[in-house]
Amino acid sequence: MTAKIIVSQYISLDGVIQDPVGMENSGLGDWIGPFTRGPQGDRFKHDELFSASALLLGRTTYDGFAAVWPLVKDEEGFADRINAMTKFVASNSLSEAAWNNTMVLSGDVAAKVRELKETLESEILIYGSAGLVHSLMPAGLSDQYNLMIYPTVLGRGTRLFPQGYSVGQMTLIDALPFNDGIVHLRYAA
């Protein structure tokens, strides 16, 4: 059995995935901050993380997560889970990862991810990491897209699917409405 790559994104109505919490100095600000996904949305994100066996992150997302998650304490166990699980960071400039249980993938990232899919089981979850996601798309390595769509239009920023990229028809797994007009869509690629 091979692992499944799940791309999990906060996304605006106009397809922007860049800097949803405002930590990347993009000028977009904390665009998910005004919204609350509610208990059903929180449960979905919890279950999504706890069903995964590993995280796969791009360098920018890794740097942001590694600076914050080791310091977080929560009653739901989300922080404990994310800190304890196996993590991979795709980077050609990072030689060693300081966050526990993290391994660096360098060189041909698509080939390394293909190897991970063959050696790991369960699900490998990608949060954010637009550059990494964009590099995996042409290789057809993403199996599922979990899109939490926020009712906001940003007008600029990095989009999930770059200009000129075509993926063909995806299969809708489910659509779940959450609080504040947030809708979660899951697609099989």
Image (tube, rainbow, N blue to C red):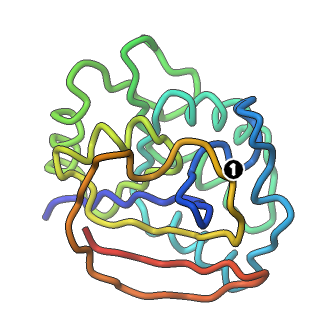
Q: Residue at x 81, y 73 (%)?
A: 36
Q: Quadrant of the C terminus?
A: bottom left
Residue 180, how many percent across, how many down? 78, 81
Residue 68, how many percent across, how many down? 74, 37
Q: Quadrant of residue 63?
A: top right
Decide: is 86 above or below 27.
below
Secondary structure category for the residue under label 1: loop
Foreground: 160 or 10? Answer: 160
From the viewer's perspective, is 143 left or right of 83? left
Residue 141, how many percent across, how many down? 21, 51
Q: Quadrant of residue 152?
A: bottom right
From the viewer's perspective, is 96 left or right of 170? right
Q: Residue at x 68, y 85 (%)?
A: 178
Question: Is the residue marked by circle 1 packed among few (<14), some (14-19), or many (20+) residues within 10 Å?
Answer: many
- Residue lying farthest to the right in this orientation: 34
Q: Residue at x 42, y 35 (%)?
A: 131
From the viewer's perspective, is 150 left or right of 49? right
Q: Quadrant of residue 99?
A: top right
Q: Amino acid at mark 1?
A: Pro
Label 1, on which residue? Answer: 20
Decide: is 148 above or below 138.
below
Q: Residue at x 38, y 37 (%)?
A: 132
Picture mark count? 1
From the viewer's perspective, is 181 left or right of 127? right
